[in-house]
Structure formats: C-alpha cells, structure tokens
Image (cartoon, rainbow, N blue to C red):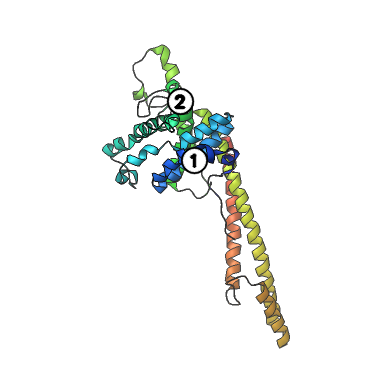
Amino acid sequence: MKEEFNFYSPTALKSYNLDKTMRYQLNMLDSLDVFTRKHCENVANLTCRICEYLRCGQKFTIYATTCAYLHDIGKLFIPPSILQKPGALTDKEYEIMKTHTTIGYNICMKDLKLRPYAAGALYHHEGLDGSGYPNGVKKKDIPYVAQIIRVADEYDAIVSKRQYKTHISISETLKILIKDSNPSEDSSYIRPIALDHLSKDFKVGKIDKRALKALFKVVIDDTHYEISCVYEYVDYLKEQIKRLEEIDNYNLKREKAKKEKDKNYYSEGMKMLFAQGETFENYKDVLEEYKSAYVTRKDIIQKLYNEVKIIKKLRV
C-alpha cells in the first residue's frame, strides 16, 4: 500500500457539472506548459471552494471557476525563457511577464465563447489598494471574481514555489497572505489626494479579507484530509508490523525448536506470512523500516493537528 493524498482535495469540484459547462473553455489549457496548466487547475479548484465558503450562488461559482481556469491563458504567448526561468526575473523580463494579463484578456475578447470570462485574465493581479497591474485600478473597479482568484492565485504560487509536500508549516504561507490583506506600511505609496478620501482608499491591502478567510477554511479542510490519509497509512503500517512481529515470533520458536519437523513447521508458517520481496534474511530490516515509518507518520499527524490549531488562531 502506498501513502497518497492530493494537496488540493478535489471533493468540492464534484459538486457541479463543471466538465459539461467548461469543456470548450478548458480545451484552451491544452496548449499551456504543464506547470502553468497545473497552476490553472489548482487555482480553479481553490476558487471553486472559496466561493462555496463565501456562499456564492452556483452560477457565480461555476463562472468564477471557469475564469480561474483561464486566468493565465495569456502565458501562451510569454517566451518560455521567461515563463520557466528558475531564478528571479530582470525588470525587463518582469514587464514582459506582466503582459500575460492583457494578452489573456485579448484572447478571451476575440472569442465569443471565452469573452464572458475575460475579467479573470485581466484583473487577477490587480490590488485592492491600487498597487497591482496592468492598470492599477482599486477595489471598486476590480470585479469580485478577480478578487477571489487573486487570493487563490497568490496562495498556489507560494505553495508551488516552496514545493510543499504536506500541510506542515502551511500557516507561514497564510501569514504572508495576511500581510498582503493589510494596508501597506509604505507611506511613499500614498499619493497626494484629498484627506477625506485618504482613510477610505488606504484601509485596504492588496487582497480581499473575506476571500482570505474562506481560504483558511479550505486549507483546514485539506489539512484534515491529509490527516485522514496519513491515519489510513498508519493503520496499514500497524497491520504490517503485527504481521512481521508474528513472523519474528515464529522465528524465535524455530530457533528454539530441537526437532527438525518443528523447525520446518515454523519455517512454513513464516513463509505463509511473508509479503512479496520478504525473505528469512531481510524481514527484520523490513520490520524496522515499518516501525520507523510508523513513528514518523504519528509525528506528522501531531504536527498537522498543531498546524490546524495555528491556522484557527490566525486573524485577518
């Protein structure tokens, strides 16, 4: 048995008939590189589930999920040398990368079937405080769907960059997003505007707090899902340890037996309990490996429970 879990639990997407609704739109993703396509799928999954926790209607949720699938479609025309660059982008390269928003918007607007979903492509890097791109628009001018996608997009970008294999320490990512949801501490960003507008315009951060709170709930769900997967594997390990300890017990009796027929009896018992690849010579090593894995997984479970506690204490 192999221990497996999906970092993004897929259960929420099954709530809707998304395949039929989005078959044409999703065909567009086939042309993207594998990493961008996976990112689009992750962001769509998160967007769908954030919408559920925000109690959005089904039609809006399907619309938002489709927008999320297509939000990075403009990266089709970003040079691979920039799109897949492992290190930091130069200023010039970053300016080119930023054009994926307007390119994606134009792709959608030129296709009648994609046109309704153009907002996700154009606005998903805009910040509520006006600090985003491509147009630097503020809260009232950013479609709600794009505000939700931005939260999902930023979260997945950090998770992918840090190559998380488990939800342990995922709270550190959420803390980064909390910082982005708060007003900027950089006073040089404040433009010379009327004082009566100052407090209104600068009480928001880059990302939407409501969507971020909903993301917290999604992450907690996924962490509990991971815990359940690890528990299943722990149960499997316990069964294997019990079986191998029974083999070891037979071996002790075999070593103490004086009669050859008794030795053969215990040897046959051991053979019947061996799993594929196990032998008289290596079963003890296998037993120790299982015991070590059991201790490690129990430790992971405890850390995951602690992570849930930390996330629940986070305040936006």
**Residue drawn at x 42%, y 45% as measured from the top left:** 30
Image quarter of residue 131: top left
Residue 177 in the image: state x and y as whole percent: 47, 35
- Residue 23 numbered tag: 1
Q: Residues within 10 Å of mark 2 (few under 14, many from 20)?
A: some
Between 2 and 105, the one lying in front of the other is 105
**Residue drawn at x 57%, y 74% as measured from the top left:** 282
Image quarter of residue 13: top right
Image quarter of residue 309: top right
**Residue drawn at x 60%, y 46% as measured from the top left:** 225
Which quadrant holds the N terminus?
bottom right
| Disc 2 secondary structure class | loop
Residue 16 in the image: state x and y as whole percent: 58, 37
Between 120 and 224, the one lying in front of the other is 120
Residue 292 in the image: state x and y as whole percent: 58, 62
Between 7 and 14, the one lying in front of the other is 14
**Type of the residue with mark 2:** Pro
| Disc 1 secondary structure class | helix
Asked if 42 appears above or below 280 in the picture, the reply is above
Residue 143 in the image: state x and y as whole percent: 46, 25
Q: Nearer the viewer, mark 2 or mark 1?
A: 1
Total numbered circles: 2
Residue farthest along the left direction in this orientation: 92
Q: Residues within 10 Å of mark 1 (few under 14, many from 20)?
A: few
Residue topped by disc 2? 143
Whether residue 217 is visible here, answered yes or no, is: yes
Q: CA distance from mark 2 to mark 1?
A: 24 Å
Whether residue 316 is visible here, answered yes or no, is: no
**Type of the residue with mark 1:** Arg
Residue farthest along the front direction in this orientation: 112
Q: Earlier in the sequence, mark 2 or mark 1?
A: 1
